[in-house]
Image (cartoon, grey):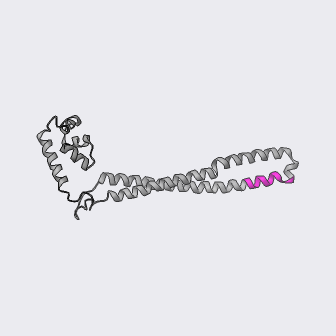
Amino acid sequence: MSSFFSFRSRIQLHQIRLAKWLGVTQSHMNMAEAQKRKLPTEAETLFIHFNQLLESIKNPASPWPGLPESTITFPKKTEEFKRKRQTCERDIQGLRKQEMKIAQQIEYQETALAFGKMALESAIILENPKLKDILEQWFEEVRLDYATEGPRALKSIRFQLEQKQRELDFLAAALEDYASGPY
């Protein structure tokens, strides 16, 4: 087993990434790992340095505690997650407004359905077939609207809200992960 493979295995690194680190092609790295070709001097020196760093870790089973004055940060990732979090928060606000609007509409639809049912059963309407037909047509439209824009729409909005909340929680955790040291 080559030292390249051993090094890669210990830090779960793909061969192509190590090749990029060392400034060689993946096929060159493959041949060097198979001991069919040597690396250029700069790449060999860099690999020796990486290997020494890895060997200096005393207890690989526990995570590196970092240095108290660590300045390792990931500003691009942090900014990206902050932007995504702001977008997610705006989406949640929009969904909450839609939820309130749909809930209000459901209340109106249910009132209209109750009224329609009572009206269609009333004696005055039963005696007037033309008015009964008009009311039945209106009542059917309200029922269809209720079926498509009522509780089912509210359930859909609430599902979307749950998904956005999970996304927001993930982004908050990601921001903590990318916060500046110590690591």
Of 30 and 122, which appears nearest the observer? 30
- Which of the 4 image quarters holds residue 28? top left
> In which quadrant is the C terminus drawn?
bottom left
- Which of the 4 image quarters holds residue 39? top left
Of 159 and 106, which appears nearest the observer? 159
Residue 121 part of the magenta segment: yes
Residue in the picture at 76% in, 52% down: 116
Residue in the picture at 67% in, 57% down: 107
**Looking at the image, which residue sits at the far bottom?**
68
Q: How many discs mark residues in the rendered view? A: 0
Of 53 and 99, which appears nearest the observer? 53
Looking at the image, residue 158 sits to the left or right of residue 24; the answer is right
* Whole-percent x, y for residue 136 in the image: 78, 46
Is 34 above or below relative to 91?
A: above
Q: What range is drawn magenta here?
A: 113-123
* Whole-percent x, y for residue 24 in the image: 19, 38
Residue in the picture at 16% in, 46% down: 47
**Looking at the image, which residue sits at the far front?**
1
Residue 7 visible within the image: yes
> In which quadrant is the N terminus drawn?
top left
Decide whether the magenta segment is chiefly helix, strand or loop: helix
Is 67 above or below relative to 159?
A: below
- Which of the 4 image quarters holds residue 64? bottom left
* Whole-percent x, y for residue 175 in the image: 36, 57
Residue 21 visible within the image: no
